[in-house]
Image (cartoon, coloured by chain):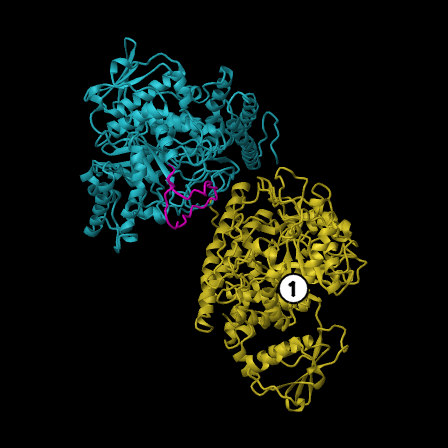
Chain colours: A cyan, B yellow
């Protein structure tokens, strides 16, 4: 497995003259994080651990209550020593990885107080008990499955097999390495299994499988990471021997209380439950005429005695829309379901909402519930795994997009800081119960991710969780420097440039201007312009001979735009003040509409698609120049991916351009070849 | 299992006063057909078998050499006796079933000489050794598979599983009943396994599996049916331990000689091989730089000593077309591959060609090789299983379409009878080696077929093979009378009317006017107007804002039209003299083009789709009236199918109409609702 951005040999080299010590008060107690940190210094980095702090070059010093956040830390220079100060060993650990980073990059010691933007920084694994991963593109699960099954081919079909015998992979080496990667970028929570909870996944919460879960949780614990499980809402019926899962039924409440008791007796610091309910066919409280606050709070009540959390996904919609029905708008579903419940959710319940109103597309406006909800714990959800972003084949540095969403201005004048990331704390019931979550992207692949460059998204996701204001460019500079440390500047700069522009490049050759979902059904890779146009998923582009896009205006459309703050609504209602990147998400626009830059819509579509493909051609050329300058296997893997990306970008370019040319009849104003 | 059109109780009732005898000379020898016939009279019909012909009401009398065809028969009245005369017991058997038919229907004895139009009347099963059936919609295989696996869900994916232990189902009752059904309509050849030969299917030709094949062949033998196997062209490499399958390699020739020797030692009347080569990824002679005559003749040579045949499919095309490439035309593939080989194929080799140039669509012009080839044995291939004709959910009496293709006028003036069915004999190397083949449609379903009305296609296929001039209407009258014998006239007439119009109805709500392939990819059921438009299969409609259809003219298109006889070419080259039903197969037509009937193309599309759906609505109403008048389970099965057909026809109507409305911008001239 690849060393990703944590190369112990390089760190050892950069710190060859260093030694570590914990200040005396820091050592007390059997703290799993400290034990792991000591082990990492001694066993992983092979650096000296001094008993006497005076003799060490780096001192880790715990000072309870020193900072506002128990995870914050500060580095300081004290004579020839570097002192890492934090309230807890978790804070010290984050300071330790910051120091490693700075040493390897050779930068000046950053003595600012460093405190996380978000208290919850989570990765949701969609791993399944048979070792497959829904929407996984990097091989099989590192948690589950048999040793001989390491691939996870994308068959657009996510049935889960029943596994005879042990469902756990027990690959401790890989799990420890992964946990360290996560800790090094500040992740402090993981959910192990797919939110579509099937087969033995339903029973992970039962004594039969808790020892296996505990083995994983114990590894993560050493890295300050709490373990969560996704649950099946219908578990009382499916595995509890009850004839109902109704949340107001005392037998159901008792079932969940017992589940919690069992779990916490094995895993005392268990994080809690992640729940997808009433969505895409999954069961939920609506079946019993209960609302989602009732459903979630019942679980909150059960887990409250143990300090656990319930993370409740807002991705609730009717997946049986009729394309003929132009009044229903899937983009409004989360708002319609959850806006009326603001203030109804318990203190230990968190609403987890995808960043946009539809589904992890290349360009969406912000989910309008952010800023609208004023008394609800919330998390913003991303998808590192790249389901709609190229399946880890195409280079796609999604951190760019995430940064934009976190810093999206909701334009609520009454909020102290109306930007989406900041809004979370200000509008929470309990500001400690807010944060970010993202679908993970690793598997048993040689390089953790399919395209080694996709590691940048895992790195960047963590860094961005920690500091919502750290720019994607700064993060990328770090990642390149840490990953390709021994390569020359030109090589690093070439890699940086490819990754830096990749998110926009991918977006440009896909479905144009935020309209989304022109992908091959089920698989979600490659173009199929009409693939979802007459389907039941509510994801339409409504292209006709005159124009394309979804009218979500208040005046003539679905009214979705009215769900935003007044200022944002007014901006979006007007085609001329709508950002071009999402204009087709919000308006049905005639092909001959002229944007502010003087270009028509149809010409904009053509230009974006020609440019997107041209960028990939350039990536292929540029990448060839790093041959021999980086690890050969990484070079080959990326080369293979780029080859497929080039072929695929060509399909996108040509199919989208031809489709709109056939529709509009307007030729390209630069005379480039658009197939008839 | 359903009794289909052979209800022994009803036959017994109609023949209660009858008894049978074989004339003395007829009884000689251990003739499997005679033995089966005697057994059927005694055991199946429970009717008396007299030793003395004088005492019987029906005498079966073999007279070698009496008629031109060894399968022909004649019924005659001799006093109070009916005499069936034929050259062979096979002919007697066909006469026997004709008499049963007439008795049940209560019609006057038909004393015409009845002789088959085609010597080979074959059903190709696409059954697989794991019990699944490629493009099977009536449950699992009746030949292969485990007893507990009776369904065959359509997953659009035809992988074959390796089966541990016995691959044969051994359901003798069902196989005998099926064989009798086939014999009763004149089928005399079956191929057991899928032409995409995979997994243990490759080994069916080896001693390991020959006893199992022999069990089946022995059953069919009693009904005058020869058994064939589909082979994998690469068998010498895959199972023969050779490093090549090159047909000119002596080791390869030796391999096939040995295969034949093994087979014929177990099954002395084995029919021969069916081969799909160099098509859709299957191996073939092109891999070795050999042509298809070399490939086929090599096999012909190996099987010649035993009197076997090689049936070689002409469905050879490159399944990796680029949609941008407007010059390549899949419709031309068979012609391009095989026209140059006319006269090159051996006497015991037959070219099996789909009726149309593309692939079993609802409307296609005739495959232009028919009539063009002048020195090649040929079979015309149909697909009873209804892959593109509604999956045995939608009622679809395809006999209408087949009759049309068999009686298609090739307009070659130099042929005695230029109609496609008749052409086969006239242009053959050996007129005994021509005929018809069709992909079977039965499985372990309760009624043999999924929709019980789909039995009419199996019945009709056989009847049409026997007599290419029997009209689909006459055949349907027979089938209704034999199947719903005890229902009243009004019920029979209601059923007749639904089935009679069903082929046209289905065609009308699907892809319009012969353009084809607007189906859901892989599954081939339900609409997806653009599903194949940018795919690699060469099946495009090229719709744009001005028009739709494939220009295959000589003047401006692919030139495909030039492959027909001069007369037909001229007719097709001119848009005004092209039959409307295939006009979009042959021309790219502007939406505002006015047909002879005064209607525009766009209005024709709308009208057909509204009418097609309206017909299904009527079917639903009409079918409701037969409740209680026929078998309840048949009634319910058809009702369920019609319900799904109605929903599906609605999708076809609306998606196709909306698609073309969005494209053309032309509203329906009758103001009916077309969704935007």
Instruction: List x then y, in percent, for residue B405.
Output: 67, 59
Instruction: List x then y, in percent, for residue A405.
Output: 36, 27
Quarter occupied by residue B545: top right
Name the residue tied to disc 1: B122
Instruction: List x then y, in percent, for residue A477.
Output: 42, 19
Q: Is residue B587 left or right of residue A603?
A: right
Q: How many discs appear?
A: 1
Quarter occupied by residue B504: bottom right
In the displayed structure, would residue B140 be above or below residue B515? Answer: below
The span shown in magenta is: A143-171
Residue A149 magenta-highlighted: yes
In the displayed structure, would residue B477 be above or below residue A460? Answer: below
Taking the image as drawn, is residue A178 in sight? yes
Q: Subunit of mark 1?
A: B
Taking the image as drawn, is residue B571 in sight? no
- Residue extending farthest right: B414
Instruction: List x then y, in percent, for residue B443.
Output: 53, 63
Look at the magenta stretch and give its main secondary structure. Answer: loop
In the displayed structure, would residue B277 be above or below residue A276? Answer: below
Dot 1 crowding, Cα within 10 Å, few <14, some 14–19, many 20+: many
In the displayed structure, would residue B71 be above or below residue A11? Answer: below
- Residue extending farthest top: A79
Q: Is residue B417 left or right of residue B383?
A: right
Residue placed most toward the observer, B538 or A669: B538
Residue sitting at x 36%, y 44%:
A196
Check disc 1 and report its element: helix, strand or loop. strand
Q: Is residue B647 left or right of residue B436?
A: left
Residue B243 magenta-highlighted: no
């Amino acid at each position: 497995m690849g060393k990703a951005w944590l190369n112990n040999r390089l760190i050892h080299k950069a710190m060859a003259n260093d030694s570590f010590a914990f200040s005396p008060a820091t050592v007390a107690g059997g703290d799993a994080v400290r034990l792991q940190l000591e082990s990492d210094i001694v066993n992983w980095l092979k650096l000296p651990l001094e008993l006497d702090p005076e003799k060490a070059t780096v001192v880790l010093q715990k000072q309870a209550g020193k900072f506002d956040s128990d995870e914050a830390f500060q580095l300081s220079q004290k004579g020839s020593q570097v002192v890492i100060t934090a309230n807890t060993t978790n804070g010290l650990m984050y300071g330790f990885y910051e120091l490693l980073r700075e040493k390897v990059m050779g930068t000046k010691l950053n003595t600012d107080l460093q405190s996380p933007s978000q208290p919850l920084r989570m990765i949701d694994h969609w791993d399944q008990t048979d070792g497959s991963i829904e929407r996984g593109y990097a091989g099989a699960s590192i948690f589950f499955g048999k040793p001989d099954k390491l691939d996870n081919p994308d068959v657009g079909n996510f049935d889960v097999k029943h596994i005879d015998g042990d469902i756990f992979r027990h690959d401790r080496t890989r799990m420890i390495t992964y946990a360290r990667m996560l800790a090094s970028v500040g992740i402090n929570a993981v959910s192990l299994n797919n939110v579509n909870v099937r087969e033995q996944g339903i029973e992970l919460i039962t004594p039969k499988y808790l020892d296996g879960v505990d083995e994983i949780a114990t590894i993560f614990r050493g890295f300050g990471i709490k373990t969560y499980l996704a649950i099946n809402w219908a578990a009382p019926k499916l595995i509890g021997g009850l004839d109902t899962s109704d949340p107001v039924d005392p037998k159901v409440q008792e079932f969940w209380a017992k589940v919690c008791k069992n779990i916490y007796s094995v895993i005392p610091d268990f994080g809690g439950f992640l729940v997808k309910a009433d969505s895409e066919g999954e069961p939920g409280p609506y079946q019993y005429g209960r609302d989602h606050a009732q459903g979630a709070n019942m679980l909150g009540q059960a887990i409250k005695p143990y300090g656990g959390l319930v993370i409740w996904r807002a991705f609730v919609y009717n997946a049986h829309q009729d394309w003929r029905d132009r009044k229903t708008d899937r983009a409004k579903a989360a708002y319609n379901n959850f806006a009326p419940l603001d203030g109804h959710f318990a203190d230990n319940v968190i609403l987890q909402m995808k960043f946009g109103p539809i589904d992890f597309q290349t360009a969406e406006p912000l989910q309008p519930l952010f800023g609208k909800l004023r008394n609800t714990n919330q998390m913003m959800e991303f998808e590192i795994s790249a389901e709609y972003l190229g399946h880890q084949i195409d280079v796609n540095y999604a951190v760019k997009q995430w940064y934009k969403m976190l810093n999206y201005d909701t334009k609520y004048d009454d909020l102290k800081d109306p930007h989406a990331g900041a809004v979370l704390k200000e509008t929470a019931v309990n500001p400690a119960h807010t944060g970010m979550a993202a679908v993970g992207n690793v598997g048993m692949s040689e390089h953790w991710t399919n395209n080694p460059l996709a590691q940048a998204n895992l790195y960047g996701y963590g860094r961005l969780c920690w500091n919502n204001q750290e720019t994607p460019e700064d993060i990328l500079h770090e990642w390149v420097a840490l990953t390709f440390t021994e390569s020359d500047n030109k090589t690093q700069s070439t890699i940086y440039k490819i990754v830096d522009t990749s998110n926009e490049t991918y977006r440009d050759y896909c479905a144009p201007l935020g309209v989304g979902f022109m992908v091959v059904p089920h698989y979600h890779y490659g173009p199929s312009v009409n693939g979802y146009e007459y389907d039941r998923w509510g994801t339409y582009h409504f292209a006709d001979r005159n124009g394309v896009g979804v009218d979500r205006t208040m005046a003539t459309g679905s009214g979705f735009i009215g769900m935003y703050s007044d200022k944002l609504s007014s901006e979006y209602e007007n085609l001329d003040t709508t950002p071009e990147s999402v204009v087709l998400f919000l308006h049905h626009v005639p092909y001959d509409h002229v944007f502010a830059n003087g270009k028509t819509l149809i010409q904009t579509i053509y230009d974006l698609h020609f440019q997107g493909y041209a960028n990939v051609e350039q990536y292929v050329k540029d990448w060839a120049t790093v041959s021999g300058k980086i690890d050969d296997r990484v070079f080959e893997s990326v080369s293979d991916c780029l080859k497929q990306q080039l072929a695929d970008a060509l399909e996108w370019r040509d199919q989208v351009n031809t489709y709109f040319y056939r529709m509009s009849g307007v030729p390209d104003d630069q005379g480039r070849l658009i197939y008839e």
